[in-house]
Amino acid sequence: MAPPRRKMTSNTADLLNQRSRGIRDTGTLHRFCLKILRSITLHENRSFIKVWSKTSKTAIMYDSGRIYFDNYQNCYSCVHDQPQNLYKFPKKSKQQKIEDALLCQSPLVIYPDFVDFVSLTADNWLCRISAETGKELQRIYLSPKYKYLAWNVSQETFYIKSVQNKETPLARQAGISQNVVMHMAIFHVFPLQIVGILEINKKVYGVTDVVMSQGVLAVSYSNKSVKLYSFEHVVQRVCMCSQSPLLGHRTVGDVPFGIPVNIQITEPPPLLFEAFSHNGIQIGGFPWHYIYTPPHKKHRGTHYICSLKDSTLAKNGIHNMNCCSLESDVIFFHPADSGRVIHIGPNTIKSFINTHVLQPSPRVTVTSSGRTVRSRFQQLDDDPMQETFRLLEYEDELDLLAIAVTNGEGEEGRAHVQLHDNQTGQLQRKIDLNEPWDEVCNIKNLINFTYFFIFHQHLLLHVHVNINNLCGNRM
């Protein structure tokens, strides 16, 4: 009988050394690379140092190893020790300013070198730009005003929403009714091609807003109801698709005509699901469940988790933080599709971590006559003078939760990042930040472990590895 297999441990330095010499199958497995990265990130002797900084008057965006400054006009690559400039567009007018953008990365089996981003300009152009060189590859004119880009199905289809048409007082006095609420343009990627332009009409929907996700139209109404419809059904039954190719005729996707509306709905499609909620609904878990907050005032702050099949309340399906704070609590299905729910409040994350909750402090006042008056006041749970959870991000490949926390030191509130094991919630590392919280609070893509930690405005922390100090680090 063969002896039982002994669990093997690998030295990080050995693996990196063998990989650098090109030894076959060493270091090429994604699992080994991630174990090395997690070990480096969490080891108590590993330090994080600021290696580069850059300020910006506009929001700083990050996506897949690239930092975008000045409304995507200036791009830096972060695959090296210090970020290096990939390209910088010539100065453009306000009309040509990029309003929003999405990074498109094709699966390797389809287009292995396809990494572009599509951008939406203030003058209604949709542009496909190479993410490596900044060269414009394709441009399509849209009409009317479009402002918001978002994925419908990630890396497959995206949609662009126009601004909402609001009825003006002058139009109301003249008896002119504005029935068109907004337009939505839907596109395929790989290659970029139009699916259709959808008109959202108040007569049909009576809507306040519309979003798309995973092929579902989620329509919000003024009575706090949310209804879900199949967009595929709409396209198959209603779409009046033009046979003209996207770039084959100047009248399609060119100035001044743009792309005409080809999806006009005269009556609502079959209803998939409906719920009444104060702030929309979320769907997730297995089997499918949804989270909602009833629209009545007495239910504010109370979240219900129910079965999507028959709306029955889940076991322990009512959650309320009972917190007093400026920012409301947040609840959502865990991004790992594990069926768990994460509920984040100012000083509690269920069911992982609890901070030390301060008790209300007595306020002492001495009057002119020398009489001492004691009163109690309600301190906010997210007061900057006490420890408060601010943001949470999940890193799926390293299976870590990253939490931004203000520690209550000083009036501005100093911040640090806590790294917790995703399975147990156990604290693994704490990384202090030098800047006050108000300088790092506006964060998009809080943490990306593959290359670096990036915070809004001018703080950049990079994993600093000394290969000579890794010899004793065994995984």
Image (cartoon, rainbow, N blue to C red):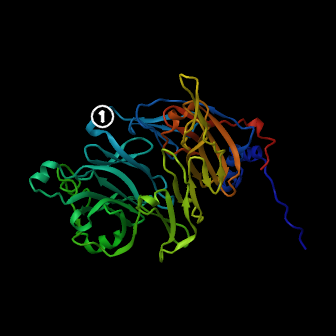
Q: Where is residue 205 in the image (x, y as percent from the top left)?
A: 27, 66
Residue ranking furthest to the left: 174
**Which quadrant of the rendered structure holds the N terminus?**
bottom right
- Element type at mark 1: loop
Q: Which quarter of the picture shows residue 2?
A: bottom right
Looking at this view, is 52 or 366 the one in front?
A: 366
As drawn, 431 above or below 402: above
Looking at this view, is 370 or 268 the one in front?
A: 370
- Judged left or right of residue 163, residue 368 is right
Looking at this view, is 462 or 423 the one in front?
A: 423
As drawn, 270 above or below 296: below
Residue ranking furthest to the front: 369
Residue ranking furthest to the bottom: 310
Residue drawn at the location 42% of the way across and 37% of the way down? 59
Q: Position of residue 397 (x, y in %)?
A: 62, 54
Residue drawn at the location 28% of the way across and 39% of the way down? 96
Looking at this view, is 70 or 179 the one in front?
A: 179
Residue drawn at the location 36% of the way across and 46% of the way down? 100
At label 1, the amino acid type is Lys
Q: Position of residue 444 (x, y in %)?
A: 48, 44
Q: Mark 1 points at which residue?
A: 92
* Residue 425 in view (yes/no): yes
* Residue 20 in view (yes/no): no
